[in-house]
């Protein structure tokens, strides 16, 4: 009995291979988009971990200065003489642009074992190799291919080294970086017994071992955004699976009735159907993992560029296969298939033995489900509103977003049914009344595909509104921040003196500025020293400021901070900001700083020089006549030997910033397109299945005199109308999504709030895409209907139904 029942159930898929293909491809695409995003996130986090483990920073405590500057060599000597096991490290950056990399110099004789690179601990590289007369740099193959080797010691490629980092001995690092003092000290965990705590013997800042790296913390929001889009794509793909399974179960009503009538137990029938879904999930999951890997491999270089441009995070552009995300993808494919088939399986389990043979009984079950669906949609809308008002974290922001999207999707069939009912009362002709009534009858069968389209359109509207608002605001902000015509970056103090001497004779004004890395509020930050000038007073983009803010900064009596620092620490004007031990200043202004995930503070240049005497002044903002900036840059390069790329005019800086901006949202745009494509596929599969089922309703209309071509055109008009209606509902949903992204998610993730702008032309483009997707999905079914032989329609009148 079991084998015969299984053969009967599987016979449906042999009879409808297109439906089987839609089911497998739907689940495979859903799994592929999810697994692709997880693969990207996994590779990025692996890169962060490799970078964090370069000096064992997540395993070894450190001593560092309070202002982020190198520590005095005397501090190291004092601690060593007192018996403390500490090891110096010199760290710094070499080069600019794509060829830049970070040098980490260690002392192999005193460094803790866990701080040494794997090739040394496993014996592939001897201790003495790092301390040869010519030096040795250990790099990843990817880093070695893009650095400029001129002036560098010998390079040896090591796979275990993080991308963008070179490890060498401390003497070589000191020579390459021109830095004598250690950047920080590593503190071994096994200190000699009897010594007092090292924190009592040193004024340096003691840093506990970190469980997560600074970069990992900064990029969490980026990866959470990717995960959210991957989950959205997965949900949209599940609509295909849910719709296909539901229609397949409805088509097999008679098979279920027959199997039950000849003695197949209900539990065994449900078990066979569940086993069928498990087999489909395993097959589709395997396909999804392969496709997801290919998608991730294609998108990873763009993600790496985005992370490098936004956060300075060095992420490998090559994808490594990780069984963890592959197994998680297979698990979510099984869970998705189970979720998509749960409702249909439950209907089979609860209906009396002959009820599945009655279409009305099945429809009544659907009606009951729709009532529950309506109530759930209202609850989700209320939850979304509550989270928007009272939520205050990144997780609640995404929960608010999810509640809005799912609530809108669940409300679509209810609102659609009400609209069609109202239009039916207004229709005058019999054909129009029939078309509206028929559309309303078919709405449950198409609702899942329309839900998928609504989610895809809402996501596109929301994200395009967010990106457009960001682009417009970012462009205007760049005009304010980059008010000088030329920006010059000298390579050393000697060159800086030559540059300054030349510019003083050829420019209208030369404004030196400098920066130092520090920690504010426990997180990485930068402190800048600026000269007071009209260019800043007239153009600087303040969100809030006290009168004469720049004058008080120049006099050393106040500090300016960016929006990110103000939001994270809850600062407002007049509050005291602790810049280092024993040094605090009141806040006189808060300025916008879009695109920067870190905190930032600005003090007067004189105060900066007094506090950071070891930081050279190498950067200059130059005021000249706008048309002469390019000529001045060329003359400066010729006169001083400054590389041309170190003198950049305002236009080039803006172009570079906008290129980084566009690359940042490249992956998001790709996921939006893929999601819209999955939604179009959902509509196609639903239309193909429903067309064969609807011939019984279309045959009488054809018999009354309507041609097959007319009926086909009605089918096209019907699906275009439904797509337009879906877009109308998607528009407010997408705008609500954009508001949540800009006002809640973006603030919690990045620390800045953007004004929300609208772009009607983008809406028209998406409307055109929605109509095009509807036309493509309906074209083949409509063509099949127009070519249906008359005898096939006539045979329907002999059917017992």
Image (spheres, helix red, strand yellow):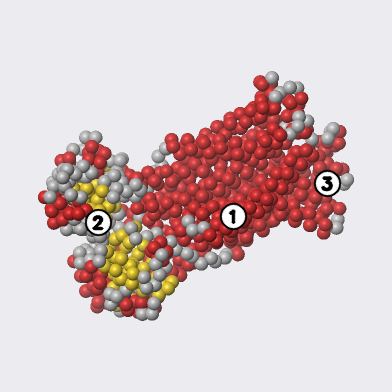
Asked whether residue 301 is in view, the answer is yes
Q: Nearer the viewer, mark 3 or mark 2?
A: 2
Q: Residue at x 30, y 79 (%)?
A: 508
> First in sequence: mark 1 or mark 2?
2
* Number of the label disc, if any, that sits on residue 707: 3
Mark 3 vs mark 1, CA separation in Å: 50 Å
- Left or right: 474 in relation to 454: left
Mark earlier in primary sequence (3, 2): 2
Pointer 1: what residue? 383
* Position of residue 517 measured from the top left corner of the image (x, y, whole percent): 29, 61
Which quarter of the rendering shows the C terminus?
top right
Q: What is the x, y in percent for residue 562? A: 38, 67
**Image point (83%, 41%), residue name:** 699
**514 in relation to 97, above or below:** below
In this rendered view, identify the residue nearer to me: 628 or 591: 591
Q: Is residue 563 above or below residue 94?
A: below
* Residue beneath disc 2: 205
Residue 161 in percent (x, y) is at: 29, 43
How far is the residue under mark 1 from the one under mark 2?
A: 45 Å
Residue depicted at x 45% and y 67%: 475
Res. 310 image quadrant:
bottom left
- Residue pictured at 30% horizontal, 66% vertical: 578
Q: Does the residue at mark 3 contact the one at mark 2 (Cβ under 8 Å)? A: no
Q: Position of residue 628 (x, y in %)?
A: 34, 75
Tell me the element at label 1: helix
Q: Which mark, residue 264?
A: none
Q: CA distance from mark 3 to mark 2?
A: 85 Å
Ranked by sequence position, the earlier of labels 3 and 1 is 1
Task: Name the residue furthest left.
Answer: 81
Residue 325's image quarter?
A: top left
Q: Is residue 152 left or right of residue 537?
A: left
Categorize mark 2 by other alpha carbons within 10 Å: few (<14), some (14-19), many (20+). Answer: some
């Amino acid at each position: 009995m079991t084998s015969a029942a299984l053969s009967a159930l599987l016979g449906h898929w042999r009879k409808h291979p297109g439906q089987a293909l839609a089911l497998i491809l739907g689940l495979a695409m859903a799994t592929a988009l999810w697994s692709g995003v997880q693969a990207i996130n996994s590779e990025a986090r692996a890169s962060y971990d490799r970078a964090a483990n370069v000096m064992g920073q997540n395993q070894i405590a450190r001593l560092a200065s309070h202002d982020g500057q190198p520590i005095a060599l005397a501090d190291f000597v004092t601690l060593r003489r007192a018996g403390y096991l500490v090891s110096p490290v010199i760290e710094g950056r070499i080069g600019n642009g794509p060829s830049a990399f970070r040098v980490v110099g260690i002392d192999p004789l005193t460094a803790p074992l866990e701080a040494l690179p794997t090739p040394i601990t496993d014996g592939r590289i001897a201790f003495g190799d790092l301390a040869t007369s010519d030096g040795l740099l250990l790099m990843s193959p990817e880093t070695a291919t893009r650095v400029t080797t001129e002036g560098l010691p010998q390079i040896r490629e090591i796979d275990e080294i993080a991308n963008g980092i070179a490890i060498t001995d401390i003497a070589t690092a000191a020579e390459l970086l021109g830095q004598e003092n250690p950047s920080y000290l590593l503190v071994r965990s096994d200190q000699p017994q009897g010594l007092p705590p090292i924190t009592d013997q040193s004024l340096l800042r003691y840093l506990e071992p970190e469980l997560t790296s600074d970069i990992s913390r900064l990029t969490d929001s980026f990866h959470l955004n990717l995960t959210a889009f991957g989950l959205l794509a997965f949900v949209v793909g599940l609509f295909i699976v849910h719709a296909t399974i539901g229609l397949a179960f409805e088509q097999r009503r008679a098979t279920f009735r027959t199997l039950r009538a000849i003695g197949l137990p209900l539990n065994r029938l449900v078990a066979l159907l569940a086993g069928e879904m498990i087999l489909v999930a395993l097959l589709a999951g395997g396909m999804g993992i392969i496709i997801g890997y290919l998608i991730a491999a294609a998108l990873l270089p763009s993600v790496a560029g985005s992370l490098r441009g936004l956060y300075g995070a060095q992420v490998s552009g090559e994808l490594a296969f990780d069984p963890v995300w592959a197994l998680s993808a297979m698990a979510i494919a099984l869970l998705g298939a189970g979720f998509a088939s749960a409702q249909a399986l439950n209907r089979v389990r609860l209906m009396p033995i002959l009820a599945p043979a009655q279409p009305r009984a099945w429809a009544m079950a659907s009606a009951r489900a729709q009532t529950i669906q309506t109530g759930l949609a209202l609850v989700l809308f209320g939850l979304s509103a509550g989270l928007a008002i009272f939520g205050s974290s990144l997780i609640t922001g995404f929960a608010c977003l999810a509640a809005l999207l799912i609530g809108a999707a669940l409300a679509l069939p209810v609102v659609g049914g009400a609209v069609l009912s109202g239009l039916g009362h207004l229709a005058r002709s019999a054909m129009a009344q029939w078309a509206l009534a028929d559309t309303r009858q078919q709405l449950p069968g198409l609702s899942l595909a329309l839900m998928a389209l609504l989610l895809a359109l809402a996501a596109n509207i929301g994200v395009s509104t967010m990106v457009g608002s960001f682009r417009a605001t970012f462009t205007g902000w760049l005009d304010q921040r980059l008010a000088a015509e030329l920006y010059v970056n000298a390579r050393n103090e000697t060159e800086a003196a030559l540059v300054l001497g030349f510019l003083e004779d050829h420019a209208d004004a030369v404004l030196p500025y400098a920066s130092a890395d520090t920690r504010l509020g426990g997180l990485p930050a930068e402190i800048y020293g600026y000269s007071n000038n009209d260019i800043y007073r007239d153009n600087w983009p303040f969100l809030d400021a006290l009168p004469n803010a720049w004058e008080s900064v120049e006099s050393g009596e106040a500090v300016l901070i960016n929006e990110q620092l103000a939001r994270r620490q809850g600062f407002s004007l007049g509050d005291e900001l602790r810049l280092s031990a024993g040094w605090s200043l009141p806040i006189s202004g808060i300025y916008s700083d879009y695109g920067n995930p870190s905190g930032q503070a600005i003090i007067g240049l004189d105060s900066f020089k007094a506090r950071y005497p070891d930081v050279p002044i190498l950067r200059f903002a130059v005021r000249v006549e706008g048309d002469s900036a390019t000529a001045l840059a060329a003359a400066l390069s010729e006169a001083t030997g400054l590389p041309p790329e170190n003198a950049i005019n305002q236009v080039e800086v803006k172009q570079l910033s906008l290129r980084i901006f566009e690359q940042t949202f490249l992956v998001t745009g790709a996921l939006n397109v893929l999601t819209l494509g999955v939604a179009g596929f959902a509509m196609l599969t639903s239309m193909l299945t429903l067309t064969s089922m609807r011939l019984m309703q279309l045959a009488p209309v054809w018999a009354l005199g309507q041609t097959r071509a007319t009926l086909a055109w009605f089918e096209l008009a019907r699906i275009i109308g439904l797509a337009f209606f879906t877009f109308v509902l998607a528009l407010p949903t997408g705008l609500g999504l954009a508001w949540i992204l800009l006002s809640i998610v973006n603030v919690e993730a990045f620390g800045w709030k953007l004004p929300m702008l609208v772009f009607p032309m983008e809406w028209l483009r998406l409307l055109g895409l929605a109509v095009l997707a509807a036309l493509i999905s309906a074209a083949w079914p409509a063509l099949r209907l127009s070519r249906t032989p008359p005898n096939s329609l006539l045979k329907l009148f002999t059917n017992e139904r």
